[in-house]
Image: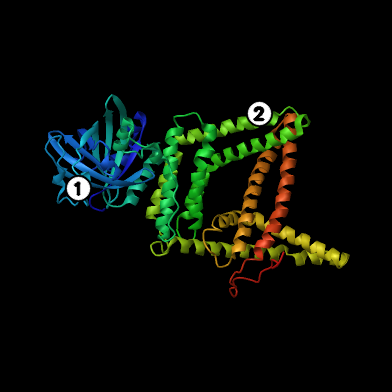
Amino acid sequence: MEKNVETELKLLFGKKELKALLELPLVAKKTAKGSHKSLKLVNAYYDTRDLILRQAGIAYRIRQTGKAFEQTVKMSKRAAGGLTSRGEYTVPVKGWHPALDKFNGSGLPLDLEGLLGGALLEKLFSVRVRRDVRLLQVTKETVVEMAIDEGHILAGKKKDTINEVELELKEGRIGDLLAFTAQIAQHIPFFTESRSKYVRGLTLLGKMDPAAQAWKPFGPDGKNSYAGAVKGQIYQYGTRILEEQNAFRESHIEEEADRIFLPSFRMILRNLFWVRTMFDRAHGLAMNLRTVTEPLEKLHTLKELRAAWRKLYKSVGSLAGSDKLTDLVDKDIARTADKIRGQVRDGAYTAVLFSVYAALEQGSWNAGEYLQLDQMLQLSAERTLEELHQRLVEQSRKEGPAAADGKKGKEGKGKARKDDAARAEEKLLARFLEQAAPLMGHLGEIADMVKIEALTKDGRKKLARLAGSLEGSMARARLLQYTAAQLGSVKDAVTAREAGLLCGWLLAASQEDRRKQVKYFRKWAAEVRLPEKAGNMPPRTVPEKA
């Protein structure tokens, strides 16, 4: 582990869960003999009146443990999924009086006194905790310090309670720390706390800018290694989920769960899709995530269904009946939302995300340190194009236009044969699009991100249009599937009639979508220039021109 770098996780457990944590064999058997001790810590944080240190990304504190005092400087931190890493420099000090000159020779890479320029430090707030600490030998190479902190942050007349568990990497590998945390999550639900005690104290004082705390997504740098860029994206969106669930479990907004969590889960899945041939665990992780996010997807579908039905009902009015379908969907939404709340309460999201984090650190990345992100995306996109082409060729061999034309050849020639061939081709492309829709959707996501040699600029635009159309039709297909399933269980005639009306409307819209997609696909296919590979890529069967 890098010297002067503190790497830790802050976890939140309920009292009952904390007791279970200490009794967990996973913890008890790994506790090093003689390492368990209890401490009383008093911390005081200092800065200038206009927060010069804060603006420079520095937290400065003095800590008293028994009769001993020490002062610590913590540098800007990197946070990911509850895991934080930051530079930390500690030297002895006498009492509660800052002595910045003592950091000379500590390795601290800046001149604190020069930074302050003569400005005086003053106490901001204090933190008092009782710390129960022990060392855990989680693997042969990795030692983790587990500290249970109970106490308060005191800022003037304001107070904030501290009840948290810190897991700090003392020796060894981050992947082992994450894997150990994922194992805990399989047995005991917990939540993460990404805010430091310093940030919580500043928040009590009203000195934290809300805009600075707002979550802002960042785009990966295409020139960085793809392994690092993908990890960064997944950690970022995982952090978003972990932070949002803290607020979610304290509120009553279950029906908003899909809006809150689903976009971040989908972004993680998108990143795993792109590295599926270059990261050995991508497929398994994606399967685990889809299992956990299934209720979120269902909730999203149900809300789309309710919106579609309300729009249709408004158009047809009393002809549809007394609108019993809305009540049926509302009840299903409530049941699904309750299931999601249960998942959050039981730590399902935390468990699956930490298993993803551990795999990211412990899995094998093919050329992960050498291939840049934009190069990886281009390779993945071209592979996806080839896969799409291969699927189309295989489909054409089974049910190509020639086969359909041969069946009807005896019935007539000329225009009739042309019409038959066109219809057969439409069916072929429709089946292909249905099978390849997930791939097409992902390819559309980067149509404008990388310059794929197999696509012209106009071809990328046509691909994006096709991808957008596919996304809409897949959403309608989900609605149709749900509505059709409801028809089999509905006993009330009015509700069944309303569901049937909605089914018919969705089916008609889906057929219109499919006609458009065949048209879009033909136009896009004419732009694709795939390299032919002898014995591997058969000649294309899609017409070059619409």
Q: Is residue 191 above or below residue 395?
A: above
* Quarter of image, res 50: top left
The mark that comes first in sequence, 1 or 2, is 1
Where residue 403 sits: x, y (%)?
Answer: 76, 65
Report the side of 397 relative to 24 (left or right).
right
Please tell me whether mark 1 sits on a helix, a strand or a loop.
helix
Amino acid type at image mark 2: Asp
In terms of depth relative to the viewer, which is nearer, 539 or 109?
Answer: 109
Residue 208 position by quadrant: top left
Label 2 environment density (alpha carbons within 10 Å; few <14, some 14–19, many ≥20) = few
| Residue 255 in the image, given as x and y percentages of width and height | 55, 33
- Depicted 34 relative to depicted 428: above or below: above
Nearer-the-camera pick, 27 or 397? 397
Question: Horizontal and vertical percent for residue 454?
Answer: 58, 67
Which residue is drawn at the image coordinates 75% and 37% (left, top)? Answer: 501
Q: Which residue is mark 1?
A: 114
Q: Is residue 336 left or right of residue 88?
A: right
> Is 359 on the left or on the right of 294, as rendered?
left
**Looking at the picture, which amino acid does disc 1 mark?**
Gly
Q: Secondary structure at mark 2?
A: helix
> In which quadrant will I find the C terminus?
bottom right
Q: Residue at x 39, y 65 (%)?
A: 370
Colour scheme of the rendered structure: rainbow
Disc 2 designates what residue?
A: 327
Work out how far the residue at label 1 is from the one at label 2, CA to CA, in angstroms: 68 Å
Residue 18 image offset from top left, x and y in percent? 33, 33
